[in-house]
Amino acid sequence: MSENVNDNTVYFQPNISLDVSENSQNVSFESDISVYIHVPFCEKKCYFCSIETCQNYTGELLDGYVDALIKELENRKNLLKQKNVRCIHFGGGTPSVIHTQHLKKILNVLNECIPNLEEKEIVFECSPTSITIEHVKTITEYGKLSLNLGIQTFDEKILQGVNRATNIQQLKEFFHEAQKYNLHTLGIDLICNLPLSDSATTIRDINLALDMGINYFSLYPLRMEAKTVLYNNYETVFSKMAPLEKQVEVFETAKELFLSKGFERFSIYHFNGTGRINHLYSRLQINGGEWIGFGAGANSYYQDQIFSNVNNIKEYIEKQKSGLSCIEANRKLNMTDKIAREIVYSLRCGKISKNYYMKRYGKHIYDSFSNIFEILKEKRYIEENKEEILLTTQGNFHLSSIEKMVFDRMKIN
């Protein structure tokens, strides 16, 4: 297998699969794991999104993809039965584009693979234009549903500028109906500095969501990533955005609003107001946990290795039909790889404990990152004291650049 793994596992969208080797049935996880189900389809492409998805899909392609997913799950049935699966996370893409009959097929297999599925959290990422109460009803029959809608903003003019749409009244009605199903979590994603937004947009969005009963928020700054429409039209887009210092101020105000409402901030982006532990896939990932993913383009992380599934949807389907492995690449992480990944995840929690890293990896390896920390301090992306390195809000807005610097350090070694 190739070692040129596309490691997008640092982001919270990753997918994963375990069709790895003849020895995969004997793999032993030392801790709890999560399962990630990847649905690489979207109704249309959002202008801020760099994730590779399919928009021109047919019912036949969806049918074939779900059948392939089921085959992959069935191949890993014995392994999943042996492990303590804490969470099942449907991501993408847009999982809500799949019909409820598809969803039932997948959940039936998961129910066979995972003991006590009814006690497990099932996170379901979805779009406000494709999610239905039938999706909600179906999932709650199998497990504890944490529903997460990609809202981004409630401002229809701003949404039009990034190729999205929503209907606030319909959303209110949907949220009201969905809460009748005893949801584990009702969450949304917001982006706090989209083009055409102003200093009041995000706070208005948060207050509106709170009034609708939302109890979990993922609040992101806009990341201008390559291969996106916004990135390719940067000069035009930049002129419609607030200055960086104003964006930082908006994020800080939003953070303080959540904290004043009693929300737990378990990462720099995530605010939980349910009073219980949820979104375990993200939490386990941040803390270095292992997960198994299924689907085209999926990655797995376990036993210090990353495995990547084939990206092409039709190729993935054909490999499953033929009984062939869908893994196209894998890589064993060395010590520098491990500390780089862990540093990035620690920064997503907002801080790095110096003592922890020196004890875990040794002073020599930790010090190999010192030049990066100095650069980040000069840019005011981090602050440092005797015990910790702390990510600043400005650093939050430049996290993609920080991650690149850290992972470039991996390549040097």
Image (tube, grey):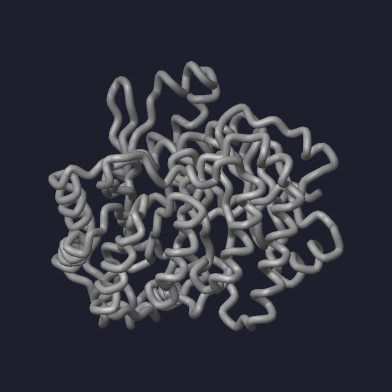
Q: Looking at the image, can residue 405 be seen?
A: no
Is 208 positioned to the left or the right of 328 in the image? left
Foreground: 127 or 86? Answer: 86
Foreground: 388 or 326? Answer: 326
Q: Percent from the top left, x then y, of residue 299?
A: 63, 51
Number of marks: 0
Q: Is residue 131 above or below residue 363?
A: below
Is 388 positioned to the left or the right of 62 in the image? left
Residue at 59 percent of width and 60 percent of height: 38
Q: In this view, does 379 lie above or below 180?
A: above
Q: Percent from the top left, x then y, of residue 136?
A: 43, 64
Foreground: 213 or 119? Answer: 119
Q: In this view, does 246 lie above or below 64?
A: above
Placement of the C terminus among the 4 image quadrants: top right
Q: Percent from the top left, x then y, of residue 47?
A: 43, 75
Residue at 57 percent of width and 29 percent of height: 31
Residue at 39 percent of width and 39 percent of height: 347
Q: Looking at the image, can residue 290 be seen?
A: yes
Q: Percent from the top left, x then y, of residue 406?
A: 50, 41
Is 127 positioned to the left or the right of 368 in the image? left
Is 180 positioned to the left or the right of 402 in the image? left
Q: Is residue 354 above or below residue 182?
A: above
